[in-house]
Image (spheres, grey):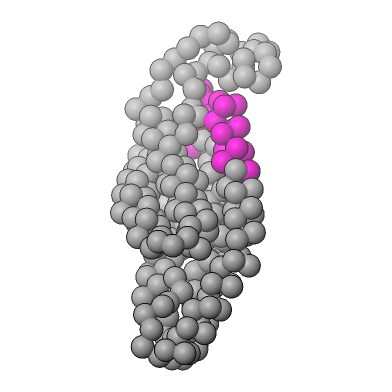
């Protein structure tokens, strides 16, 4: 998120300098601020853009006649994991250089929680796809498949809060007030949140079709135990 402006613009963005000696004067970001900004951009890209795209691919394409899982998996793991990993490491490095201590404030604690939950979610997704246990659950979705969906939505909600806290609170707490997060970055956050939940909500309209297809697969499997049909 290109949210950390070239400074002195805080007074202008807030509706007037109000005695700010730096009003109208532009200063480049420091190296530490650049590092923190890159952390914000990469983590926002990973958690609020790429992971939601992967989830929407699954939501919209699972009823179509092709294997959607591999597109979902490539986005969620192969593309997104390196970006999130680098972004998270930049945040850790920034905290180290600021000598603030690690995992002592909400932003750092939630950041650690998100990394752990993301790792769990990747493993849970693999289990949900490759270990359906049809003989145990008689062709119905196993509980861990539903857990995968619920955990994914919880991660999105938590990540949205995390980015909001980083933009609106953590940047100023950690780096001071010389440079402020621009309004365009805050508006971009809001747009990403709204777009995801609207698109996901609309995608829920495909559930009846999905359930109908899964019911047909169960009937086909019951008629032919050797059938290769399987719900994704």
Q: Nearer the viewer, residue 66 or 141?
A: 66
Question: Along the horizontal axis of the image, is 60 left or right of 86?
Answer: right
Residue 205 lies, with reference to residue 127, above or below; the image says above
Residue at screen point 34% across, 46% down = 83
Residue at screen point 49% across, 69% down = 148
Question: Along the horizontal axis of the image, is 182 left or right of 198?
Answer: left
Q: Can residue 188 be seen in the rendering of this structure?
A: yes
Question: Along the horizontal axis of the image, is 76 left or right of 194?
Answer: left
Residue at screen point 37% across, 70% down = 126
- Magenta run includes residue 185: yes
Residue range in magenta is 174-194
- Residue 14 spot, x, y in % from top left: 66, 20
- Quadrant where the C terminus is found in the figure: bottom left
- Residue 167 spot, x, y in % from top left: 55, 37
Q: Quadrant of residue 169?
A: top right
Q: Main secondary structure of the magenta part?
A: helix
Q: Quadrant of residue 120?
A: bottom left
- Say how many tags the image has: 0
- Residue 47 spot, x, y in % from top left: 47, 49
- Magenta run includes residue 16: no
Residue at screen point 61% across, 38% down = 190
Q: Can residue 112 be seen in the rendering of this structure?
A: no
Residue 25 lies, with reference to residue 188, above or below; the image says above
Residue 69 lies, with reference to residue 22, above or below; the image says below
- Residue 46 spot, x, y in % from top left: 42, 47
Q: Nearer the viewer, residue 210 or 23?
A: 210
Residue 213 lies, with reference to residue 186, above or below; the image says below
């Amino acid at each position: 998120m290109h949210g950390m402006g070239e400074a002195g613009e805080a007074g202008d963005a807030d509706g007037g300098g109000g005695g700010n000696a730096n009003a109208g004067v532009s200063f480049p970001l420091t190296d530490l601020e650049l590092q923190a900004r890159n952390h914000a951009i990469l983590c926002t890209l990973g958690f609020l853009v790429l992971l939601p795209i992967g989830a929407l691919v699954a939501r919209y394409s699972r009823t179509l006649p092709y294997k959607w899982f591999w597109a979902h998996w490539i986005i969620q793991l192969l593309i997104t994991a390196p970006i999130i990993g680098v972004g998270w490491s930049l945040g850790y490095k920034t905290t180290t250089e600021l000598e603030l201590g690690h995992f002592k404030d909400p932003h750092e604690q939630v950041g650690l929680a998100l990394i752990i939950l993301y790792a769990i979610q990747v493993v849970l997704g693999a289990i949900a796809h490759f270990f359906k246990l049809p003989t145990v659950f008689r062709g119905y979705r196993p509980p861990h498949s539903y857990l995968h969906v619920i955990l994914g939505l919880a991660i999105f909600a938590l990540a949205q809060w995390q980015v909001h806290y980083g933009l609106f609170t953590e940047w100023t707490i950690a780096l001071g007030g010389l440079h402020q997060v621009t309004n365009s970055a805050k508006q971009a956050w809001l747009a990403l949140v709204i777009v995801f939940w609207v698109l996901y909500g609309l995608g829920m309209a495909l559930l009846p079709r999905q359930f109908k297809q899964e019911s047909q697969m169960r009937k086909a499997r019951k008629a032919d135990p050797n059938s290769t049909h399987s719900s994704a």
